[in-house]
Image: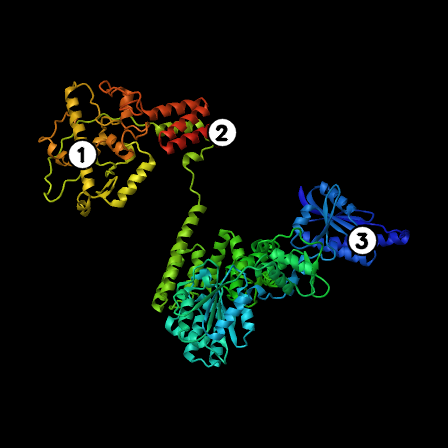
Amino acid sequence: MTEHLVLWHRWLPRRGRRGPRADAEIAAWRRTVRTRLEVAGARVFAAIGASVVAAWEPSEIPDAIELALGLLDDAEAQEINIALGAAMGPTTDVSGDLFGAVIERAQQLANRARGGELVLDASVRDAAREGFLFGRQVAGSWRGTTVDREHPRRQEIADAIALLAPASFPPIGESIVASCRMHLDADTSRTFILRGPVGAGATELVASLASQSAHTRRLSIGAAPGGVVPLASLRLSLLRRFGSPEELRKQMLHDGATELSAETIASVANGELVALDPLSLALAALFGPRNGARQWLELDPLSLVDGASLAAILEARTHSDFVIFGRLPTETVLPRPLASLDERVIEHVIPPLKTSDAHIVSEEILGPDTDPDVARRVAVLGGDTVIGVVEAARTLIATGELVRGEGDGFVWRAAPRGGANMISTEALISERLELLDVQTRRVLETVCIAPDGCARALLEAVAARDGIGPATFDGSLERLIREAFTRGEARPRPSSSLLRWRVLQLIPAARSMELHRFFGEALAARGGSSSARGPRLGELGYFLLEGGQANEAQPLLAAEIEHLVRAGYRRAARHLTGWMAQAAESSETAAGRATPAPPPAEAQDEGPPSSELALEELLDEITPEPARPAPPALDQPPPRELPPQEPPPPPAAALPPVRPAFESDPAEMLELSEDDLVLIEDKAEAVGDGALVLEFGEFEPDGPDADRRSTAEVTAAEATAAEVTAAEVAAAEVTASKPASEPPTSSVPGSSTPSEENTAARTRLEPPAATLVGDQAPAEPPEEDSDATLLFDAGQFMAAVLGSPEEQPADVPGPDAEAQAAAGKVDTADEPTDLSSDTTNVGPAPARTFRDEATAAIRARDFDKLERALQQRIAAGGDLGTVGRVRAVAHLAQGDVL
């Protein structure tokens, strides 16, 4: 089956026109229709009477509609009444004939059409909406839409956008205009900051001010690429104003500037980085008063003017007299060079438009012949900014809702748009963007990413790399200019910064990176880095870095930063350095998000994941390893004599959380959660090697902080040491009184006989005996078979990390207690259990109990019971990571995870 557009031509006989003559006319007309269809490339596969049926390829929909409209015009001129129906769908070729429901649908649409109408089904209408305007809806078994015969082509209507008049500043801001005028006349300020959203009317305000003064010269200085490319704002504005460096040089010499000043400014226009001092003197000559006319510089937007251009402009004003107008968003902080000026800076906030002001702007741009109701509706849709009202008018014209009427006004083509609510300017711009064809949209994206006002030749070079030929580029750019998307032919740029921002916001990240790379390649091909002084090094580096070519961009940007420092633009150098670091970090983050991690080898096996396999892996993960037999106690090193001037450090057993320098993974020796390990490691890294982390701060036993401990801290440590020493001595006496075959009991609740790894770790950490017990230390080291060795084992470490035994959760025993309890090696006969207490000295391992409950519940598919066990585990302070993994296995068992 093949997709086709089927066009059905139908003749509607007129009353009173019968007989052989009428039949001959219709036969001749049918031959004309068939010939024109075949010449246009259509496949005529049926003809009966005056009806002719033809098929087109889907890509030829615009040509088919144009041919149908031409047939309607010719038939009307010959007073022949015809109607056409068009539908698109699959067809089947059987012995040279086409069959399919789409043919019957096209016939029904033609039968429902009135004389002189072309009716399209929904699929054809959607495919033709970019180029054509539509009329009434046709009801019936198949719904259709007619093509507007009076205004059929959208492009002809959209051309009327160029007929809109420019907007002026509304009356609501007259007080701001008067205030600025007063300060200019009194010469009390030369710097004015106009705050407000994009399109609030700052440009119109400055134009209104300039119209009231006959002695002004205006120069708009716009955005640099990224707001960071050095001197790009100044260079691009000069090229937009004068065309080329040579023309700029000639104009300066004509105005009486010195040869040195003219050469300096021409070098800047050529892309070279000129030192701050000579450039400021040359700018003073360029921007100085001339023939009584004062220069006005419009920094719009001020936040995207590069730092080097701003520094040169402000330095030039110390040698000359010119006025600066800057536009900033309401909440943006004033740049430091302007905030630190030793002269007065006047700031004004442009208020939002009232409905009456928006109505005035709407009437002005639509023309005096436009109906007041049309102007009112446009004002309401546009909202409270000047650019919003302008974009509302452009959108209504582009969509074909407003058309040029008699005279110079606009009228509704069919009916006003439903509703009377404001539409955001971004939404209005997006609606217009959707009407552009693919090639024109790509050209607009290129213009918006390009430097503000770069040469057309550079845009053509980038478009060629993007697969757009010269003819397509010229036609697309011509349309963009007609429909007010761009302005300027020699140096095209977006019609407003808001439109530029919206287009850039809608460009996908990969597409944006591709266009930046094309610009970098085009700049490099034009010799952007040929000079040792570095003309346009920053611009080339910017586009390469944004294009993902960091290795090529970083040397160029580093060289540009060095040039900036030597040329005196230190603040601009810092700004570029910060942007470079931020852009590199953003690129790495984006690359990490865009590059998925390869799946593990076991995940590449065929078949869905198994809950049984996941359960076995989880059980292996949460089941503690069996405890190793404890080796004999190691000999203790001889006591170490401490210098008399240094107080002994606190005993190791009295230090609550201690982060020992384990040589092996702490998780293998201590059953800690991941959060506990991260907390301990972070504290250890914060205080350095050999430092001990206390509950009340950080302390290095041999460091300079030892003498700064408070008396209360020392007293608390000594008291804790005495308590632990007494407990250890009592435990030693109990152990000595027991038979040799009886395993010793731990002196610390929750601890057990130390494993081999714990014993080795304690040996590395153990301080001398005199350090641990002070004057109560035994004179001789204990015997090898004695279990009363004063060591800091894993159970004590857990107690120190998780708090006192009363504060410990019941499901966090020592790492060896569970294994010993399971093997029946822990003697609790001498220690009666208080059943009324929340804590016990030694008991069955809760981790094993949770494991058994979870395993049984999952295997029995009793998920309610499993959830209760998980809630108990969480309430008891269990490891949330284990709980999450058990839940994942449960979901897998339930079939929630594929």
Q: Which residue is under mark 1? A: 721
The dot on residue 667 is none
Q: Can you give x and y, in whole percent of width and height, for residue 566 in the image?
A: 34, 67
The label nearer to you, 3 versus 1, is 1
Q: Quadrant of residue 441?
A: bottom right
The label nearer to you, 1 versus 2, is 1
What residue type is disc 2 on? Answer: Gly
Point 67% across, 41% down: residue = 1
Q: Nearer the viewer, residue 335 or 890?
A: 335
Q: Which residue is under mark 3? A: 31
Q: Nearer the viewer, residue 240 or 613?
A: 240
Q: Which residue is under mark 2? A: 895
Task: Of the two numbered discs 3 and 1 on the same chain, state the one appearing first in sequence.
Answer: 3
Tell me if 860 is positioned left or right of 207 in this view.
Answer: left
Q: Nearer the viewer, residue 826 or 392?
A: 392
Q: Can you give x and y, in whole percent of width and height, for residue 611 in the image?
A: 44, 28
Secondary structure at numbered mark 1: helix
Q: Quadrant of residue 428?
A: bottom right
The label nearer to you, 2 versus 3, is 2
Secondary structure at numbered mark 3: helix
Secondary structure at numbered mark 2: loop
